[in-house]
Image (cartoon, grey):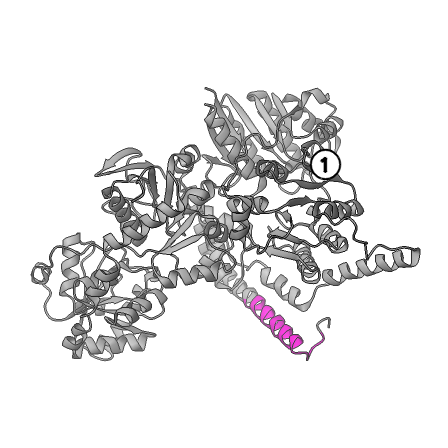
Amino acid sequence: MTARTGTIAFVPPRFGAEVVGGAEAVLAEVAAGLAGRGWQVEILTTCARDHYTWANHYPPGVERNDDVTVRRFPTVVDTPGEHRWRVHQLISARRRPTITEQQLWLNDTFRCPGLFEHLLDHASDYRAIVTGPYLAWTTFATATVAPDRTILMPCLHDEPEVFLDVYEPMLSGARGIWFLSDPERDLARRVVPSRTARTEVVGAPIVPPPRYDPDRFRTRHGIDGPFVLYAGRREAGKGWGRLLDAFGTAVRREGLHLHLVTAGVGDASIPDDLAPFVTDLGFLDEDDRNDAFAAATACIQPSALESFSRVVMESWLAGTTVIANAGSAVVSWHVERSGAGLTYRNDEELVECFRLVAEKPDLVGSLAAPGRDYVTDHYLPERVFDAMEATLFDWTTP
Amino acid sequence: MSRLLVVSPYAPYRDGIAAYAVQEVRWLRAAGDDVEVLSPLPSAAHHHLPLGRVRGAVALLRVARRYDRVVVQYHPALFFGRSSNGPTALLTWAVLVLLVRLVPVELRIHETNFGVGRLPHRVLSRRFLAGASDRTVHTTAERTRLAAESGLAEERFRLIDHGRSFTTRTMLDRPTARQELGIDGDPFVFLSIGFLQEHKGFDRALEAFGRSGVDAEYHVVGSARVDAPDILAHVHRLRTLCATIPGAFLHDRYVSDAEFDMWIRAADMVVLPYREIWSSGVIERCALAGTPTIVRRVGGLEDQAGPTTRLIDDDDELVAALRDAAGTSEVADMDAPTNRTEAQALVRERAAARAGVEVRSTNEAVEALRLLPPIMLPLPTSPRPWVARIKRVIHRLTAWQLSPLVEQVAELQRRTVAAAESLDAQAAAGSVDRRA
């Protein structure tokens, strides 16, 4: 075994128990996992909790979080968003923004000069600096100041922004890239066909909960009968609006007897006439969330922009079938490999999935059978951390 | 420990002066200074101000007073945008003169506009320059030119090593760098690297490479910084040259800093055939990597030249330098004219080749249309809440009239592009004359 010498820095845009975000969750778990294996680990992050406002919530400075040192730096949000809007308009019109426009776009969001300054002074103190997701300003800044020590966990989505020129040097110049899935790596090859950094598909660590109590969940929230679950951010980009539309069609037009339960952050914006069929539980603690997965007949993943999809894994661990948007190559890949769910290509197919849940709940429930083994075979923390450590030993030196 | 403000374009923007500033800030901080950065656009700097406008320069006065000294990475666009003349520029010069009186200002001069414009502009720019506590340049040529422009003695311009704060951004040796970059075999590798712009002269280096007949590879690496028609035409010309010259390759990509240095490490010889330049960071990066250079004697490059630099004055010397570098100096110059007729023919052939790529094809016209910024109503936002409120009110009052017009023009743009694309597709199929 090669020595675990040197400090590994992790740079997520946000960090904290109340932070909701897939990439942040993965980076936090990996940081804790590697610290548990004896690595010196630091988290370098912002003081923000909310990814809508990026307002400073946590105090700046150094704190200790179990085995990990956390250094927080204040965010600065002082631009009106005109450049982001303009580039969004250009992309929508299928036009390529110039490099100057792209650079303005990149900086027309929260920024974190203190973090940049810390890296400028101390990057060489770290054996590796692990950062992601690719859209975050912190990730781009890290890769700019210390590319030779940067290991990207980009969490790429197949969206127009990923093809902007400004990301090419980030992806090609980093010391290495950890991908969460094969489709994500394939996407990176499309983004930078000529050359990418060293890469490895490592996956994301998924820790099986010690127990599930679906009955407690039903009792606590007064939910009876079969239901489908959506757990995640209620945002257009995550497919929430279209899910709600299709569910509305299922219960209004098709008259299906079905309930939708949703948990997470963001405004659920449930139409009045759907209110009897939809239960919004808001933000749930981890145990309650796990129990929700176990209680559901099926879990819906409506997002087409996924680089891994933790909710799919959490659903399968809980023994629950996944119904997923086939527009996400990554989730389709998981479903095809595991066989533990269904995918839909359009709203009508989603409505038919709902019909199957309402009419044949046992059949739908039985589809989940191979899901738990799929997760434990590929994404148990030990396996993922082994793969990450192998690359750390190979790509970096103390 | 002094409290210091660096005024400069800054990371994560990627351009030469921003990269230079980042390295100098790192160097100053390591030396114990308390450094903050102010940039003209939002960036990783601590502050940002619209320095290209008078109000930005005035705001800089207020910020600068809080520091013991100010270091300005000076180039005209930092304070003047596109124009150094006119009444706005005059006001800006006046504010800058006040700045150097308020606080010690060190000027790191990268490019200049001193001593140009009308008399008041020239007077104020010289006062600004004379009032600075320190003025540094990278080469004696720059110093001589600045002294002539400003009327200040040469001794008042201090020479500093362009690469004093540079550090290498790759640890790879040459074979590994070549492997990483996909350079197979063991060819002699020439390299020109940087943003693709006509003043860099990469096209003349490729032509010289073609004439030299050396058994080697010539790699041009870089990207167009802006999609201006003249730059697109230049990139097209480079592409055409690489397609017709054996061993020449264009890597039209926006490369990372690490890859930039990797290319320099991988090359046997870096060629800087610039038509015009003040000084060059590439020479310094080559010196760091130990890669020899062929450099045109222009601007201050002669002063930057090290022991492994070969200076050239014209294209014939460039051809000879390429041959010497690759050890093939006996190869005859097949293109060299031997009489007036051949010379005339060569002139016409080269001019026609250049004109051929500069004439817009339908494809390029389509590209130019696509690049037209979309018309849209300005977003009613501002970092200042009261301004945002006013904008929202104006937006509500006027949107009912303006929005239909904007949508109409946007639709017109879309349909024009679609029509041009259709024409281009027909031309590609041979049914329409591309030049029609």
Question: Where in the figure is residue A165, as x and y percent of width and height?
Answer: 52, 54
Q: Quadrant of the C terminus of chain B?
A: bottom right
Q: Quadrant of the N terminus of chain B?
A: top left
Q: Which residue is mark 1?
A: B299
Residue in front for this viewpoint, A330 or B262: B262
- Residue drawn where x is 46% and y is 60% of the image: A189
Question: Where in the figure is residue B158, as x and y percent of width and height?
Answer: 65, 23
Q: What segment is highlighted magenta in the picture?
A: B411-433
Q: How many marks?
A: 1
Q: Is residue B256 visible?
A: no
Q: Main secondary structure of the magenta part?
A: helix
Q: Quadrant of residue A249?
A: bottom left
Question: Where in the figure is residue B193, as x and y percent of width and height?
Answer: 62, 47
Queried whether the magenta region covers residue A136, the answer comes back as no
Relative to A145, A312 lies left or right: left
Queried whether the magenta region covers residue B420, the answer comes back as yes
